[in-house]
Image: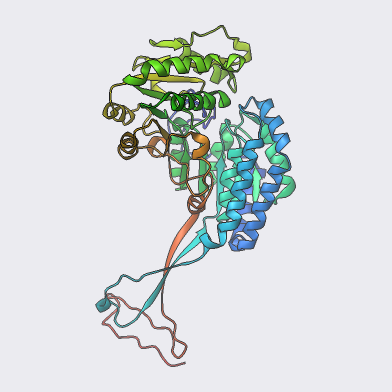
Amino acid sequence: MGNLCTANEEGRPALPSSSAPETSSTPLDEKVRTAFNAQREFFATGKTRDLAWRKEQIQLLMQAVMANKDKFSEAQAKDGVCPSDFTGASGLVAGSAMYYLANIDRWAANKELNDTISPERTNGIDCDWVRVMEPKGVVLNIAPWNAPALLSVLPCLGALAAGNCCVIKPSETTPATAALLREVIAEKMSPSVMTVVEGGPTVSEGLIDLGFDHIMFTGGPAIAKLVMARAAKTLTPVTLELGGKNPVLVDEMDDDMLKAAVTEIIGTKAAFSGQFCQCHDIVLVMDSMWDKFIAALEAGIAALKERRMARLVNARQFERVKRMLENHKGKAVPAVPEYDADKLCIPVTAIVEPAADDEVMLEEVFGPLWCVLRTKSIDDAIAFANRIPTGKPLVSYYYGASQEHADSWQGRTSSGCLAINCGPMRLQSNFEAAIHGVGNSGMGGASLWGEHVFNTFSHAKFAVRTKFNEKTQPAFAGSIWSGPPGTYKPASL
């Protein structure tokens, strides 16, 4: 199997060197194996099933992060993460943790179910049915480089809420953040509950080979395929949070709404240097809005001034996005200024009407560029959105004044999530709503927060038992294979 690198041509993860499957496990440091076995042994004690224990661990992890949020900002700045300021992300950690603490009791409670068997098949013996939410065991979280602290922690809050132990494998692309995570978590939490393992692709491979009870991977499709293939050797379930080319349809609207929409599109791209899985990627503009939109977009980008230069995380990502910017058959808007490769900065730029075979049209940009295309009708826009080369996107956006068109976009396109006349910040402001992909943009559950994540890291066990009677032994509900009905009669106590 190819290496599970984490900095590739598509964006967040690295391209594998090979896709041929390996037949043997990758060697792993004995200390890591010892830590993994310690978590296995601790989980076997049953302690993690206690809800008070789960709440305590959530609080410890939240405290470890919140007490060091300034240090995380410094570490992410050192690693070239954009934005490096962890203040806003720390609010998501705290909010998510508090939401879990408020709802674990309800989510973990047994749920009584109806018995749907027909009366003539019961043989006069009634049964009780219940759904039991039980923890899976030991979870591996393979985190990405674009939000290295946040996406190392958020999935683990959900895993702890569900009663699991966790191993975090941060990206080797952000070593300062990885080292800080290891330090602050070790100070607050037992390694038999939560531990951080640093290293590169071979460490990821060795960890997967250990045979976790669940693997959480955030990255891109190329490495996701390798993770799934390697996890298949131990039949380990996998949750994938990926990405894609997120489309936005710009429909008819008044000038004030257009200004707000353009500000959102540009502001999101500039704030993250485009290295954010929810950024707008392909902008589809109705013919009737074309001239106004292009003018507003060009003016908005120009207004960024020095902020137009967006720093990429490393040289590899810089070269990948630079290739997209300099090799296309469209028009750059505004014109591309001179930029310094040594600073790893790419100017925020719209590639207007690129060719279908341009690289910028075929891959997730994950950088400060958009593809901007005309569309004649809502039907044409929907048809295009449903055949994006990277598959079903993580997020789809509709910006416009038509309720009918908004309903059509919602009902006739497929994406992990959908935002109508709002952006990513509002999309990720509801702890009751999952942010997850579909198909090439993700599968296997959710990872950020809420009951969806609790369920991802839980096993729903369905249990049936005959009803107990204080006066007799429990009845036994036989089947057609165990003899004629009534062969067992409960004896008196």
Pick whichever, 206 or 401, lies toward us. Answer: 401
Q: Which residue: 32% across, 34% down?
A: 405
Q: How is the protein colored in the picture?
A: rainbow
The answer to whether residue 246 of the structure is visible from this angle is yes
Pick whichever, 111 or 252, lies toward us. Answer: 252
Relative image position of residue 373 (x, y in whole percent): 36, 19
Q: Is residue 176 left or right of residue 216?
A: right
Q: Quadrant of residue 125?
A: bottom left
Pick whichever, 244 or 278, lies toward us. Answer: 278
The answer to whether residue 169 of the structure is visible from this angle is no
Q: Which residue: 24% across, 78% down?
A: 120
Relative image position of residue 62 (x, y in whole percent): 67, 47
Which residue is most to the top? Answer: 338
Q: Quadrant of residue 75?
A: top right
Relative image position of residue 410 (x, y in whole percent): 35, 38
Q: Quadrant of residue 317?
A: top right
Q: Which residue: 47% across, 44% down?
A: 239
Classify 77 as above or below 320. Answer: below
Q: Is residue 361 left or right of residue 148?
A: left
Classify 6 as above or below 65. Answer: above
Classify 488 as above or below 255. Answer: below
